[in-house]
Amino acid sequence: MTKITFDYDKLQDVICNINGYELTEDGSIRFKETNKWEVLLKGEMDSIGILFMWYNMIFKDYDWLIRVLKNYFKYAEKSRNITQFYKGYVEPYGLVWTNYSRFQMVDYNEYYNSFKSIIYIQKDPVEAMQSIYFWLNKAYDENFVLEFIKYHLPRYIAHIKYDGKYANSIVDYDALKGNPLVLKEIIGYIDDSFNEEAFEKAFISPIKLEYKEFSMEAKELISEIWRREGMI
Amino acid sequence: MEKGGYDIMNNVCFFSHPKTGQHWILFFLANYHRILSSINEPISWENMMEFGKSKEAFTVLAPNRKYKEDLPHLIRIEYPYSYSLEIKKYIDSFDKRVYLYRNPFDTMISMYYYFIANPLYIKQINKAKNFEDNQYFEDFCKSHLMGYISHIEVSIDKADLVLYYDSLKKDPSDFKKLLQLFYDEKIYDQAFQKALKWSSFEHVNEMEKKLKQGQENVVFHARDGRIGQYKELMSLDLINYIQDKWDKLKERVEFALV
């Protein structure tokens, strides 16, 4: 099992510039904006650093994966922070998930570079477009779907190509759902004594998301753009 | 005709990708309107930045106009036409739509400066954030380019008027087409020239600098609006890559892109 270590100097460099965190001499990270000087991290630094990335997945997909991971650590009685990097809120250790591209802001790039491991989660493009479509729209409009794909799919591809490029591994979301072994491997990054019993208890099958399937025309357009951008 | 010397013709939706020069156009519109409304000073930076704070709505400011209905109604958004059904419906609800685009090379440079290489970010993180990290800079450009190109692809043929930033910089006469969407009267040349002067990059830049003097951790919006800066900053490979993507876009859209 890979033991994760952390570049302490880099952490200091990054954290001190993000949202009021600072690293103190005793190795703890403090949140400057409250006067409470909340101690966020102390002692062992080897559990730090895994970042999940994905393009906008719908919330039920987030829920399932994060719930399994959180439950695993709860049942295994191990303390790991599992948080979302969202609108500037940063928990600079443990496991963080996000859909923000590193190319959006300088801080994001610096912050993402501080992680020991980055796992990029990729979805089948038809699945991804359907998820995003029904996340952003209530109604199904056959003609509009084509225009929607023309805008969103290239952005999704750019996210995979250029954020994915900086990832240590790219995991297919369907593989993650269908095969607990993939999830075990991910947990292994932040837990070097894997607890089988806790995992079995934590693993629940994901909810099958129900939405109207795209037409053949829409699926063909997805294939065409996917090919055009060199994804096949 | 209204007392101010014009009748309002249309509600206009002005949409474009970020960093294509929206604020410059908006400065011009606001200033022209102020001149027609007998206000003898340019719109302030603070008022203009209301555009940046809200993607919902904005009415061009002219404080001496009593009724909101008197004012040209302009909404500025950065969403593309097909972002969602809601956005499409919203853009369709306007009388007229104006779309602005810019050459893809300088747009990427402008985005890079805004998001990554902004002088105040550099100060903030105390680190040189220029173009030394070539790989990151190239990936930044390639990543954002895809969003920019698809923004144009789904939007440009939905507009009643398309403005090209680079052409406007060389010859601002296309601004007249924009004004004609708002006002049914002739274009007042003196006001037109004055509004151009008030809205120049030099003037806008000065206003921003003055306002932000001494402040820390603020982002500068305006630089110099130069065309062709990319030639100094991009590798030939990157230029060719962008050109290729741009040429392929031209084959896909009916609109005659420059």
Image (spheres, coloured by chain):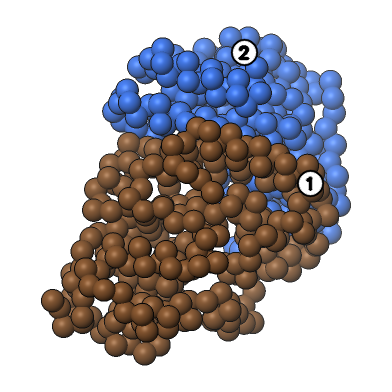
Work out whether residue B218 or residue A8 is closer to the camera in this orientation and state it. Answer: B218
Q: Which amino acid type is shown beneath numbered disc 2?
A: Ala
Residue A19 vertical placement versus A220 (above, below): below
| Front: mark 1 or 2 | 1
Left or right, A14 with respect to A2, comes to left
Locate residue A73, reporting x and y percent. Answer: 65, 26
Q: Position of residue A54 (x, y in %)?
A: 59, 31
Residue at x-position 40% and y-position 31%: A147
Q: Residues within 10 Å of mark 1 (few under 14, many from 20)?
A: few
The shade of chain A is: blue
Residue at 42% over, 44% down: B156
- The reply to the same-chain question for discs 1 and 2 is no
Percent x, y of residue A121: 63, 26
> Mark 2 — on which chain does it sit?
A
* Amino acid type, label 1: Leu
Q: Which mark is residue B236?
A: 1
Q: Colour of chain B?
A: brown
Residue B201 visible in image: yes
A80 relative position to A137: left or right: right
Q: Secondary structure at mark 2?
A: helix
Q: Disc 2 marks which residue?
A: A175
